[in-house]
Image (cartoon, helix red, strand yellow):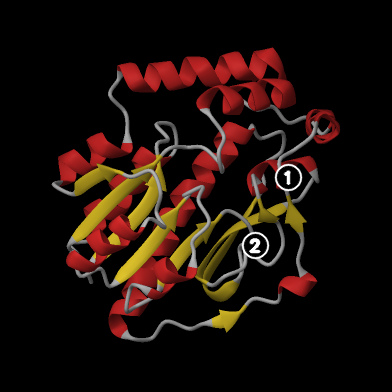
Amino acid sequence: MNIAYLTTDDPLYLPSFFDRVLSARDDPANVFVVPPLYGRQSTLDAAWRYLKTFGPVATWGLTRRVLRAKLRHQSVASVCGRHGTACESVRDVNDPAFLELLRRAETELIVSVSCPQIFKRPLIDLPSAGCLNIHGAILPAYRGVMPSFWMLANGESTAGVSIFFVNDDIDAGDLCGQQTFEVRPAESLDGFVRRSKAIAAELLLEVLSQIDDGVVRRVPLDTEGGSYYSWPDRAAVHRFRQSGNTVW
């Protein structure tokens, strides 16, 4: 398959994900990286929101880790370079010019990996094999933003990763892959996300193999019976810490 991966500029968790996936597949592939921002948010807006929510200690921890990763040239682009996979930056995945680029590349499947932009119908309908999204929770529970944080804050003992075919709604569509795993006691959010991304890479390889073989199973998600979460507030962060969890 000719696959287009739509992802974001994250040097902490996504390089290892793409290293695993690209090393296991020999498809013609293109990786497109969008800024790690939501809507019209600026980089300063994102930093301020994180600081207000998680406080100065967690923000300093994030800053140090990002700087360390950048000094080590750790990025999605560098991983793509090692695997000979094209990697380009794009600002808007719904832009008609970008859609035309995908058409010229004869894109058969789109895979969204932590892409923070909402996909519109022309993008969803473009690839012949469909458009997949990876979500770090057991859908239809924990739809929305930062499911890893919310599962820890709510004291869940079991977490998971889901892969589904995208439709017009947020974190909805047809489920085609799901893997659960146990939450470790007093696990940091950082460690939890790293485990989740490693599990997601293996699950994606399984789903892609099923698509190759024409045996992928699609089950509509019942979002009425699920749950939805937005960006955490300070009360949620307090509950997260009271449960013995840390960010780093």
Residue drawn 52% across and 37% down?
Answer: 37
In the image, is 10 to the left or to the right of 247?
Answer: left
| Residue 86 drawn at (x, y percent) | 18, 48
In the rendered image, is residue 187 in sight?
Answer: yes
| Residue 189 disc label | none
| Residue 24 drawn at (x, y percent) | 25, 58
Disc 2 to disc 1, C-alpha distance? 12 Å
**Image quarter hosting the N terminus:** bottom left
Q: Secondary structure at mark 1?
A: helix
Q: Amino acid at mark 1?
A: Trp
Q: Secondary structure at mark 2?
A: loop
User: In the figure, 88 relative to 144: above or below?
Assistant: above
In the image, is 21 to the left or to the right of 204?
Answer: left
| Residue 150 disc label | 1
Mark 1, other Cα within 10 Å: few <14 / some 14–19 / many ≥20: many
Query: Which corner quadrant of the image does residue 19 belong to?
Result: top left
| Residue 72 drawn at (x, y percent) | 30, 20
Q: Which residue is situated farthest in the left direction here?
A: 84
In the rendered image, is residue 205 in sight?
Answer: no
User: In the figure, 230 relative to 177: above or below?
Assistant: above
Query: Which corner quadrant of the image does residue 73 belong to?
Result: top left
Residue drawn 71% across and 33% down?
Answer: 186
Residue drawn 40% across and 75% down?
Answer: 125
Foreground pick, 230 / 146:
230
Q: Closer to the N terminus: mark 2 or mark 1?
A: 2
Q: Which residue is situated farthest in the front direction here?
A: 96
Foreground pick, 179 / 47:
47
Mark 2, other Cα within 10 Å: few <14 / some 14–19 / many ≥20: many
**Image quarter hosting the C terminus:** top right
| Residue 232 drawn at (x, y percent) | 75, 38
Q: Which residue is mark 2?
A: 138
User: In the figure, 114 relative to 74: above or below?
Assistant: below
